[in-house]
Image (cartoon, grey):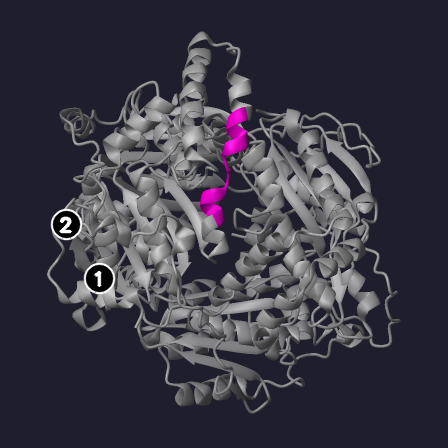
Amino acid sequence: MKHGGALALLLVASTAAAATSPPLEPARFTLDNGMTFLVVERPDRPLVAAVWGVSAGSASDPPGRRGLAHVVEHLLYAGSRTIGTRDWEKEAPLLRRWERLYEQSVRRGAAVSGLDRVEQRLAAVQRPGAYSGVYTRAGALGIDAVTRHDSTTFQTLVPKEKVELWFWMEADRLLEPVFRGFRRELAVVEQERRQRIDSTPAGTWFELFDAAYWGAGHPYAHSPGGERLEVARLLPAAARSHFETHYRPDRLVAVLVGDLSPERARALAERYFGRLGGGGRARGGGAGDAESAEKVEEVAGPALESLEGLCACRSQVEIRYPTVPFEAGGDAVALDVLAGLLNSRSGRLYRDLVVGEGRVAFAASAEHVSRRLGGYFAVRIEAGDAVDLEELIPAWDRLLGRLRTARAGDAELERVRRQLLTDSWRQLEQDAGLAHRLAAAEALGGWRQLTEWLDAAAVVSADDLARVIDRYLRPADRAVLSLTRTGNSGR
Amino acid sequence: MSRLLALALLAAATPPLTAPLPAQAIPERPEELRFAPSTFEPPPVDGLRFELGNGLPVFVVPDRSLPLVDVVLALPAGDRNEGPGEDGLASMTAAMARRGGAGDLGTEQLDDAIDALGARIEASSSWSRTVLVLDSGSESLDRGLELLASILFEPRFDEARLEQAKDNLRVSLLAEADDPRAVLDREWLRLVHGPDSKRSRRLTEASVAAFEPGVLARFHRRHWRPEGTVIAVSGDVETESLVARLDELFGGWDASVSEAAGEETDQAGRPGGGSPGDEESEASPDVAAASPGWRTIDRRGPQAAIAIGHRGAVFDTWDDPDRWALMLLTEILDGPGAVSRLRSRLQLEEGLTYRVLTWFDLDVVRAASVSAGRQGGGEFRVFLETAPESAATAAAAVLEELRRLRREEVPENEIATARQSLLARLPLLFDRAETIAGRYAEDELLGRPHAYWAMYRERLLSVTAADIRRAAQRFIDPEGVAVVVVGDSAPSVDPGVRVERVPAEPERDVAGDSGQQVAAGIGRQSLLR
């Protein structure tokens, strides 16, 4: 179960010209409890790609509990009152006792007597791995989840004959999840963090740069993996509270792609997920929830602090310019097209910085990252052989100057459009990828944004590019991460 | 009609339900759900295979749902065809064929021509194959194929672009010395295959310096040959006209166009192939590492990286009973599902690691070249990362699980789960046009009979616990493993492993200006930008 890195899922999809419009028309329905489903029927597929997501990620972590959303993602694999236990009646009182003792030990910062003994008794009634085991025995694959800044998604590929198992399993853990194995899961989360961030040469620096760029307290200032010390002090009650606040049916979107008719999907969805909220086992929906949802909408702009450091990695810079939140039109799309103009082997970055006359870079790329609460345009340049770090930013500024004076030509824009168009088709090819894209777009305001985005990209002009360059890519208004290479002893 | 289907139809025919169905419609446990049996069979290969004028096989699987086409051309040449001092040459040749201009087009013109189509063409090389991939919109296919053919037949290996790539490669080499996973990979492969094996050789500054346009062109002439090459096409195509067009472009390619590979001809044809007439292998294959033992490379960091294992298995037929048994054994030890002994123990029970990765190469080479195949054989490797203080415990747990596979028969329910999980992944290998065309083309490239897929289910069903134990005793050698730990960790606590605590490797001159051999690499493909 991974957590998303700094670069979130970019929405890139669908088409411009009507003649080449990709045949994408998912069936969409919403249950009475507010949970939304999208279904793309693909008759010949042996597996159904099933994804559901909640529009809450690490940006929803409360102060002092950074990493909570990601821990809840992990805990949702611990099972329910049915899955993961040998005897729920025996387990439940033990679990309550364990939680009381565990809370005491965390608050005191020292082990409390009896905790280990209860844990041993729990081990006798719990079945770790049972959740994934049910799926694996049924031949399901690709069981995975990802926590990003604005969302958490859960994925399964299930044999088409057994698609009902997905409805059973996912509704079951949403209805009555049991967050067992809490302490062990925190240890696994810590291992994941070390493996993904701490063990990659520049990983920690990018995390620090996020904090510097967004500024303390900003919802995007910490990575989905959270803060180690805060994760270590999390309590099961906080995890339950996060779950109850955010995993409400009206904030859930599920997408199914494969050999499944929308009618059958709807019948199964009503039967299984119709039980969430509203019914006898109702949950959530208090005033406090609305308040916390409001709070994340009023955030300060980025702090734009720059950062310099030494790293056992290639010398490199990342330059970030604040832009706009996600939108399937306007400046947001023009900035996406600008990134396309800069990237690829015939793009400006490669031509000027990687292989040109005055080349300075081992590699260079641009990206427009646009999330729900804000966006930035990032240019990353890794220094070439025997190139000083100090040469990189002036080289980029010169390129930017040329972009201002020599506007994008028709052929250049046509190249970018064609690449965006073909890319958008490619993204429809794979069922799981399509399911994730649809879920993300639906959470950001509707799946049609996938097609609207490309319609907007198709009409971005050289004037639009010039406008967004002037408006957003201003030297006075940026933050820079500069990493200078050190030997392998450096850390 | 099943009750389920009846319910589904009922629901489809009625307006949206306003209240949930009664609770009894939902079984108490998932095991109570009843499903139709899986009907999946690999699609028939009949009608998908064509031959060009020169005999080059082409597999075509049309899928007209999106205006996209994927073309893959695979040649049976790779790292294994490199001679002494040529480390990295196969990959460099592939990379520069794509980047260094082709035919009438210079480097930038070629990039422009490909990008203007919105297409992608990439070329890369691995141990035993070189692959050229074209991925384009169907309306650009014709021009894309011309460009692909130009890259295949007349790459220019532009000198300036090659020099830039060499500069970048030097930067890569430096970065890899910093990466604990790359250090682990280099050291472990050296211990497993021996320092002189092609399998353990890695790119060095010296081999980078030797890359010249003429050297690349020579490798291209000798090894990019039609014999054994296959083409797979999938997507929005009309089969007949496509095959005709492929015949125009590739059907005239014959051996006389390429320079004969001379002393290395024995390598052409099948991967892992050695000289004909090599002696048969011994009855009991020796999978032990060339230098078994435990080696710790001290390196401070939050995480220790560990590799444990030895050489992989080599068979002379795809249908060897031990090969099917080893497939199940690997799944039991560490399949991708949660039902994996290593994951259960290291993650679910002890919380020691986020992820364990196990790899068991089960190579097949033609009869009469099995002993040469030892050179061609791959690895059996368990990789994991854990906190430095847990490294010794985690490694000991892995070794204990290996011994257990040799000692005890695997319980029937565990075998059933592993079998189910392996069979469940079969559809994924044939799940859309691209994978179907690619799978059958790969059969031809590897010499794997298409019938392999038809026997797959039945063969896995017939493997017994005794078969698995026998395969474990033949192909897993816990005393012959090489264990490498990169990290600040305690020595082995496993009583059966010969501990060879090696002092910390002297710091290399990673600044690189002394000209000494620098560092290593995890896959060469990733080295070039």
Q: Residue at x 65, y 28 (%)?
A: B390
For mark 2, what is the residue? Answer: B19
Q: Secondary structure at mark 1?
A: loop
Q: In the rendered structure, which amino acid carries the disc numbered 2?
A: Ala
Residue A277 screen position, x and y as percent:
20, 39
Q: Which residue is mark 1?
A: A26
Seen in the image, is B342 located left or right of residue A5?
right
Viewer-proximal residue, A461 or A395? A461
The answer, for residue B514, to whether it is visible in the render is no
Residue B384, position in %: x, y? Answer: 62, 39
Res. B459 in view: yes
Magenta highlight range: A121-133
Label 2–label 1 contact, CB within 8 A: no
Residue B439 in the image, given as x and y percentages of width and height:
53, 72
Callout 1, which amino acid? Pro
Number of numbered discs: 2
Report the side of A169 relative to A193 (left or right): left
Residue A139 drawn in magenta: no
Q: Residue sitting at 27 percent across and 54 percent down?
A: B25
What is the residue that sits farthest to the bottom in this orientation?
B53
Q: With B389 as the anchor, is B110 left or right in this view? A: left
